Amino acid sequence: MTEQHKDIYPVRDEFAQQAWIDRDAYQKLYRQSIDDPDSFWAEQAKRIDWIKTPTKIKNTKFSASDVDIRWFEDGTLNACYNCLDRHLEKRGNQTAIIWEGDDPKDDKTLTYRELYERTCQMANALKELGIKKGDTVTLYMPMIPEAAMAMLACARIGAVHSVVFGGFSPDALAQRINGAQSKVVITADESARGGKFVPLKDNVDAALTRDGTDVVESVLVVKRTGGEIDWNERDIWFHELVDKQDKDCPVEEMAAEDPLFILYTSGSTGAPKGMMHTTGGYLTFAAITHQYVFDYHEGDVYWCTADVGWVTGHSYIVYGPLANGAITLMFEGVPSYPTPGRMGEIVDKHQVNILYTAPTAIRALRAHGDDVMASSKRESLKLLGSVGEPINPEAWEWYYRIIGNSKCPIVDTWWQTENGGILISPLPGATDLKPGCATNPFFGVKPGVVDNDGNLLEGATEGNLVILDAWPGIARSIWNDHERFIQTYFSTYDGMYFTGDGCRRDEDGDYWITGRVDDVLNISGHRMGTAEIESSLVAHEAVAEAAVVGFPHDIKGQGIYIYVTLNDDFDPSDELKKELVQWVRKDIGPIASPDVIQWTPDLPKTRSGKIMRRILRKIAANETEGLGDTSTLSNPAVVEELIANRVNR
Ligand code: WT7
């Protein structure tokens, strides 16, 4: 265990005093949410404007033979109405979306009224294209307000959106269009990211040459860059169709359990799974978590740096914030362009109060040194958030000290695409923070730790993280494959939702996520989280980033293979290798002694910044033949480099 793990950052009184939830409120409401979910969620459902108020609250079954999850099932509502219409009276002229372009000179704001009118026009346009309740629409878009509008327009007319991240390849897009059977695809000519243009429309054209995509009748194209594109009969300029539409559009009355969206996510095996989220429970859960975890207050400027192509963008750029009438910032570019200090500069420019980003972004900044934030003051910030992977204590401390000027609580939010919203996280007015620790379950979330046989473990312990009962935001199924849903999540441990993550529960009952269980190593019969070794390495001054995988080892069962990216000021050497080995041995113990260290300028990552350990494991194991599809990586070229420089033990 690293030293930092013992540090505690207690809740500050000033923060607790103004917070929605303080310690006592957390204890009381958490108990109620677990002991009497019906009364807790009936109360929380009041944050939604229902067309028909639900009387049945929770009706859920978790078992390997039958998974059937229904929340608020006799209620009806419209998600778009809740995000837009109901705010018009009070906040029609308040900013809904602040858009910051890739180029720092480009920005604009949209009020709730403007967003409403444009969304209605878009909904009418979709209707003109023949889209009806229950149809799916695939979105493959840049980070521009039209992406949020398109999602909301679908919701308005009862269509189910499937957003595909704009960094995916034509093949990946084709697979998802086919899976969702969308008649309409919405895209743009190009997206702009980091000063480069990504040919979205060309990619759609290419995708639509693939098998199984002839279902597509129309492609709606937003003009973003004006870049040159081919034009086909099915293509329609967004502005030509949308500008002429009526600025009002009636909402479709949806049952709480009608689907709101599909979002594909990759598992460790098989084709991507189209997670299906429904309307009432998802929206309630996105709204309550956004309000309490980020302690959102009226008028706060809130910035989540995710892309709308991921669930974080769905729940915490669009649905959660807009349901709460918030000001949500949408950033088109990458945090390091045109200069590494851009993120801080955006915070100053728009006076951002709440910043929600990913550990990988924080580590990338930290590798530049503390001066990287010198171009901004970030005095408007009052809360920071982290999501996507375990945040190592070193990165946490840096985030706290350098980005947050040592005055902002950090909420380390653990959740998954399947979950709809945050499940384990500090509440900033209620929870003492521990760097690298996700701490406590959110209201209505009942985590458990099981051993490999599914026995529930008590007290301070370590094992597999499961969730023992349903919460409103959980995905209801995999699109068109309920069997696979049950198989993937409910068959490992009958009656429990298996997260695929490992965790440790400490003496205080706080949860530390140790990473995917398939990444947990077993060294001579000792379990060890790769995240733990990585944390240790990143705490070394020379290390920018490290990835640890297991590889087959004759004696120990598994050995430890480490890929290391060094900070700018350090060069690879055998001495440094020895030093790092000693460092880890000293920090964690001889059992964690690294067997192999390979230097690398970069790690293979998904577009969302997740390290592709599958590839690293194969290279470490010298199984470089069947690496599978590497086209969806953000940096495919690094794979060859890694193979060429593989270290033989
Ligand atoms: C996996 C889910 C929905 C969030 C974006 C990623 C890892 C996520 C944390 C965290 C430790 C985390 C887990 C989880 N993860 N947040 N705060 N601490 N690990 O969504 O792509 O569905 O990935 O991300 O391993 O299972 P996702």
Image: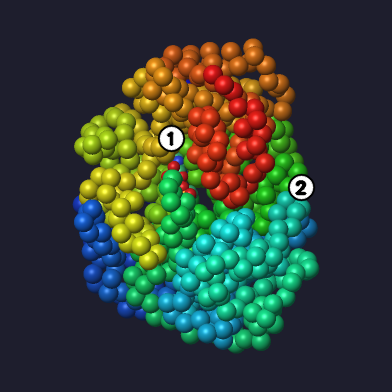
Horizontal side of residue 576 vs 41, given as left or right: right
What kind of residue is marked 1?
A: Asp
Look at 67% across and 41% down and name the residue there.
637
Gap in angstroms between the C-alphas marked 1 and 2: 35 Å
Residue 174 position, x and y percent, is: 56, 64
Say which quarter of the image contains residue 59: bottom left
- Closer-to-camera residue (219/461): 219
Look at 58% across and 13% down and name the residue there.
578
The crowd level at tag 1 (other Cα within 10 Å; few <14, some 14-19, many 20+) is many
Look at 47% across and 58% down and name the residue there.
264
Q: Which label was assigned to residue 393? A: none
Q: Is residue 68 above or below residue 617?
A: below
Look at 59% across and 31% down and name the residue there.
545
Q: Which residue in the structure is indicated by mark 2?
A: 338
- Closer-to-camera residue (435/199): 199
Circle 2 sits in a helix, a strand or a loop, which is it?
loop
Q: Which residue in the structure is indicated by mark 1?
A: 519
Horizontal side of residue 91 vs 588, given as left or right: right
Horizontal side of residue 76 vs 81, given as left or right: left
- Quadrant for the C terminus in the image: top right
Q: Is residue 81 above or below residue 559?
A: below
Residue 15 position, x and y percent, is: 47, 44
